Image (tube, helix red, strand yellow):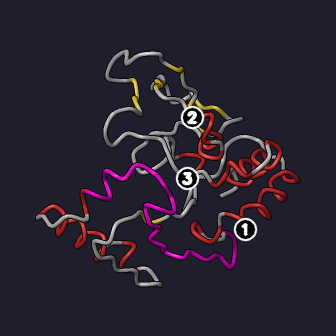
Amino acid sequence: EAPVYPFSIDSDLAAQGKQLFENTCATCHGTYGENYTYPNLLVSLESVGTDPYLSNHYTTSSTVNDYFLDWFNTGWFGSSENNLHIKAEGGYVAPPLDGIWATAPYFHNGSVPTIADVLNSTGRPLRWSRSFDNTDYDQSKVGWNYTIQETKVDKNTYDTSLMGHANSGHTFGDAFTETERKAVLEYLKTL
């Protein structure tokens, strides 16, 4: 079971966000609550537009690829009620979002520090760093407080210009207004 969000939640705003989420995001990420759904959807690289490096790596024939497919197909995803089994076709499985507030940074490669940045692709930092203090949480943006870096400072700077580290894609939230984004953020805190 996912950890409960430890800070206050605006329930009216979260209710608005739930409606937006179910109309826009649930096709890939499922619905939540008593009658939840999880579609186990493999989303093509063309659709999601996120960094293709990992997916491309695992769609070429190799021992590592075979090991990964076996791990995936015999693990939680493969044994779920939907019995998802994948072949090396390219793309990413849209993850369930239970406890998403606690899983920053976001995307499969950890390239996006907050959910606010996931929902607004124009606000994503090119290079960023954060402290590793467990109290360094950004409640308003839902994720890590971070500092934008002009250049790569050290190993703690995430540089999205490096191969496999891009923060591109998943631009679906760009269609939301700022008010709608805040509502979706508030709803995601409840998962």
* Quarter placement of the C terminus: bottom right
Camera-nearest residue between 12 and 44: 44
Whether residue 55 appears in magenta in the rendering, the answer is: yes
> In the image, residue 111 lies at what x, y percent?
45, 39
> In the image, residue 181 lies at what x, y percent?
75, 47
Q: Residues within 10 Å of mark 2 (few under 14, many from 20)?
A: many
- Pointer 2 with pointer 3, Cβ within 8 A: no
Q: Tell me which numbered mark, 1 or 3, is placed earlier along the sequence.
A: 1
> In the image, residue 182 lies at what x, y percent?
77, 44
Marks 2 and 3 sit apart, C-alpha to C-alpha, by 12 Å
The amino acid type of the residue labelled 3 equals His
Tell me what residue is drawn at x 37 percent, y 24 percent: 156
Marks 1 and 3 sit apart, C-alpha to C-alpha, by 16 Å
Total labels: the figure holds: 3
- Pointer 1 with pointer 3, Cβ within 8 A: no
Span shown in magenta:
32-56
For this view, does 169 lie left or right of residue 74?
Answer: right
Camera-nearest residue between 55 and 191: 55
User: Predominant secondary structure in magenta?
Assistant: loop
Q: Is residue 77 above or below residue 68?
A: below
The residue singled out by tag 1 in the image is 22
The residue singled out by tag 2 in the image is 124
**Tag 1, which secondary structure?**
helix
Q: Label for residue 170? A: 3
**Tag 3, which secondary structure?**
loop
Q: Tell me which numbered mark, 2 or 3, is placed earlier along the sequence.
A: 2
* Quarter placement of the N terminus: bottom right
Marks 1 and 2 sit apart, C-alpha to C-alpha, by 24 Å
